[in-house]
Image: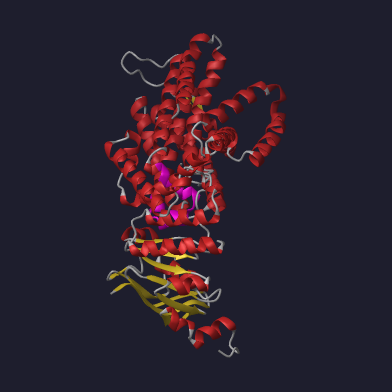
Amino acid sequence: MTFLETRKLTKNFGGLVAVNNVDFAIEKGKINAIIGPNGAGKSTFFNLISGFHPPSSGQVIFKGQDVTKLPANKIAQLGVARTFQTTNLFEQSTVMDNIIVGHRLRTKSNLFDAIFRTKRLRKEEALCRDKAMEVIEFVDLQKVAHKPVSGLTQEEKKRTAFALALATNPEIVFLDEPAAGVNPDETEGLATLMRKMANIGVTVCLIEHKMQMIMKLADKIMVLNYGEKIAEGKPEEIRNNETVIKAYLGGSAIA
Amino acid sequence: MSKIQRIVILGLILFAIVFPLISNNDYFIHVMTLSFIWMIGVYGLNLLAGYTGYLSLAHAGFFAIGAYSLGLLTVKAEMNFWPALLLSLFITGVLGFFVGLISLRTKEHFFAIYTLCVGYIIYLVIDKWDSLTEGVRGLIGIPAPANIGPLTFETLRSHYYLVLFFLLLVVLIMYRIVHSLSGRTYIAIRNSEDLAQTIGISTMKSKLTVFVISTVIAGLSGALYASFVRFIGPDIGSIAIVFDFLTYLLVGGLGTLSGPIVGTLLIVVLSQRLQFLQDYRMLVFGPVLTLLIIFYPRGIVGAVAAWGQKRRSSVHKTRLNNLPEEQVKEG
């Protein structure tokens, strides 16, 4: 069943076509990967889906609803979460404090509640805290939960970013290069975590350059080059696809 | 809040309450009351610049709007002080809303520059609109706050307590906002607006809310100033005032709860001590401020907090090291 799909999604930046007529369908509960050479438009594609840039044309459909024109925060409320290449976390704060706010979008308390410390606020604060603890356990960061983010390893920061995305109760998460700057052992750990996310029913879609990891992990791969989709399919299909090999090794290479 | 913090805070409040009783020097009480008024304004700026990450340089303008609204309502419209105070906060808030609506479309430096211009425009309007504001002549004869039942605010000491009351109220409100989910939302915006948006925060709505609250608090500070000093001129809206606010905030600690108090008190006391240097005291302030920002970007309070955190974590580490190995593994 199609869960999230893009129809003829296109984005122009001036004269540059960053994403060109991309049709892509994401299935529920699967791990989907987007690969492609640098500058292929992968991150832009993510930005279009998550509502950061309005597309020049085309549509994004999530669970049968057209979300093309919705702003990023509305899309997040529908259950679409994402992470960034750089984790963007608040370094001086603890992991826990960084993650608590992740559940904010499911709460209603406002300034009035804040100033008068109403029952609702206290209830929702406890709720956010519980949710944070739950996702911290899920990504296996209990040991550093009360450490400031500045003292974490790159891998732990990535896990914190995952946890923050998960705290929003998403149905699908978009991970932008989750394993960048992380050593092979730790990459393995992150791959296991992504598999675990898919197993609890959170659909995963990631951009990644680490081919070995992708080939093992992904259920479905889409390849972008110069903003266009040049291939789509199972890992083994992609591995043997001539166009893909050409795109990566240059036009004159003989596959 | 730890026990020590509680005791320190209670001690400070107690000191503030007893201060006018033990000091016979009216001048000191006058200076203290003025610093309390500045502190309120600095708290307004702190919520926006310190906790939400938007440095507004229009806050002297909103301070002046609060002061002039109160002044005009009491002097020219001859309203009672208390409804005039409420109305002037309302006026500041409404103007803040519209300024925020436009200025918050910009970010970072652009926001600072934009608001700097807004602040200057507010100053110009006050200065040039003779028929309403009396222009450079200023507004004279602003009445002291009206009595509430048996409470009167005619004397310096009673005024001191009134301002102290408002300061404590503002601090309480700030404390509660910062330590609530709303506060976490604002801090998330300061940290990374993109990230805040991806976790479902409506950033514009939150920023606008903070902007309005922050201008209302600046307005409160201005209104209290007007009724305390009894005379206001367009200068209170000048750029120099906003940079005073900013200095207090930076020295005390941007984005800290006690920063506005520490910074304001320190600078005000220091300026009083250095009166004999006249304008040359800026030669002292300039380098000190520069060094402080280079080495302690979160001001004095931020530096103390960081030092405490470091000490705590090293204590924690040595404790862990002293534990038998099995226990460490379990923990």
Q: Please state, as top left, top right, bottom left or bottom right, where the C terminus of chain A lies in the image.
A: bottom right
Against B298, is B271 above or below? above
Location of the N terminus of chain A by quadrant is bottom left
Nearer to me, B37 or A240 = A240
Specify whether residue A231 is in view: no
Q: What residue appears at the point 70 percent right and 26 percent down from the top-left corner?
A: B278
Query: Where does the magenta region start and end?
Result: B183-205
Q: Residue at x 45, y 22 (%)?
A: B164
Front-most of residues B308 and B315: B315
Please report the residue visible at 46 percent of the width from the left and 82 percent of the height from the top. Answer: A238
Residue B109 coordinates in the image, percent (x, y): 57, 51
Whether residue B203 appears in magenta in the rendering, the answer is: yes
Q: Position of residue B54 (x, y in %)?
A: 50, 47
Q: How is the image coloured?
A: secondary structure
Judged left or right of residue B194, residue A25 is: left
Decide whether the magenta segment is chiefly helix, strand or loop.
Answer: helix
Q: Position of residue A139 (x, y in %)?
A: 42, 54
Asked whether residue B214 is drawn in magenta, I would say no
In this rendering, would B248 be left or right of A113?
right
* Residue A204 in view: yes
Q: Position of residue A52 (x, y in %)?
A: 43, 64
Seen in the picture, residue B137 relative to A57 is either above or below; the reply is above
User: Where A229 sits versus B20, above or below?
Assistant: below
The residue that appears at 40% across and 47% down in the rendered structure is: A100
- Horizontal side, residue B25 vs residue A71: left or right: right
The front one of A192 and A52 is A192
> Residue A119: which quarter of the image?
top left
